[in-house]
Image: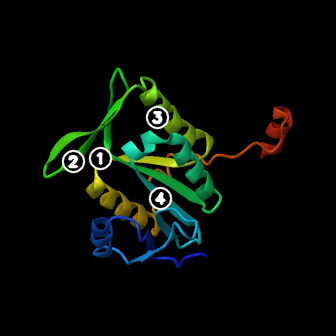
């Protein structure tokens, strides 16, 4: 199922507070995206590209990195751009990772992932591999209101094909045409 351009699809299991704030700013609809094999947030840009955002709380992601990797692998083949949005704050400790939650205007300790002293390094390596090996964008926000801000900006920028940010500085990447570098250099001569 391919969605309609200009509409933000939100999975019906996502928090109501996020959906309500987004619906006041954008045209949204809540549907069973996960049942349809899509990530938590989905849009089709004006060029027809399908883009998805999978939202995970940091503690949930740290609890089972293999499950997160498997889920992202399923979504990767279903879209043109995939983003992992990690919500939460964590601090490495000598025994693992301590997460924190924000509620009622203050930070308080959340789940402590103990007896895993290498967990923070594994998490950093996981994010690096997602970006560099799989082309998955990894965004990190501190709490759900930042998620709303990110999703609003992500949607708005995705719907604007005239954005010129960094165009004058970024040289388009031209993939190699031939495995032999000398043949490739000859092919690129003007």
Residue at the spot of label 3: 123
Q: Along the horizontal axis of the image, is 169 left or right of 113?
A: right
Sequence-first disc among 1 and 4: 4
User: For mark 3, does the 10 Å Cα neighbourhood hold few (<14), some (14 to 19), or many (20 or more) residues?
Assistant: some
Q: Nearer the viewer, residue 95 or 158?
A: 95
Could you tell me which secondary element the residue under label 3 belongs to?
helix
Tell whether label 2 touches label 1 (CB within 8 Å): yes
Find the distance from the CA under tag 1 to the CA under tag 4. Answer: 16 Å
Q: Which mark is residue 177?
A: none
The front one of 33 and 51 is 33
Q: What label sits on residue 142 in the rendered view?
A: 1
| Badge 4 element | strand
Disc 3 from disc 4: Cα separation:
19 Å
Residue in view at x 56 percent, y 53 percent: 71
Q: Which mark is residue 53?
A: 4
User: Mark 2 or 3 closer to N-term?
Assistant: 2
Say if residue 103 shows up in the picture.
yes
What residue lies at 51% left-to-right and 62% top-to-bottom? 39
Q: Residue 72: image x %, image y %?
A: 56, 52
Q: Is residue 3 above or below residue 106?
A: below
Packing grade of label 1 (10 A; few <14, some 14-19, many >=20) is: some
Residue corresponding to mark 2: 102
């Amino acid at each position: 199922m391919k969605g309609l351009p200009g509409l933000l699809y939100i999975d019906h299991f996502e928090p109501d507070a996020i959906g309500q704030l987004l619906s006041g700013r954008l045209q949204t609809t809540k549907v069973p995206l996960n049942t349809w094999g899509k990530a938590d947030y989905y849009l089709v840009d004006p060029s027809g590209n399908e883009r998805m955002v999978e939202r995970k709380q940091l503690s949930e992601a740290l609890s089972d990195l293999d499950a997160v990797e498997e889920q992202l692998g399923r979504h990767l083949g279903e879209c043109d751009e995939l983003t992992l949005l990690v919500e939460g704050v964590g601090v490495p400790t000598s025994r693992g990772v301590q997460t924190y939650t924000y509620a009622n205007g203050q930070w308080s300790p959340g789940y402590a992932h103990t007896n895993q002293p290498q967990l923070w390094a594994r998490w950093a390596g996981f994010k690096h591999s997602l970006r560099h090996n799989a082309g998955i964008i990894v965004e990190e926000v501190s709490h759900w209101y930042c998620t709303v801000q990110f999703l609003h900006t992500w949607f708005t920028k995705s719907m604007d094909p005239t954005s010129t940010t960094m165009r004058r500085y970024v040289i388009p990447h031209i993939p190699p045409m031939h495995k032999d570098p000398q043949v490739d250099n000859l092919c690129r001569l003007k």
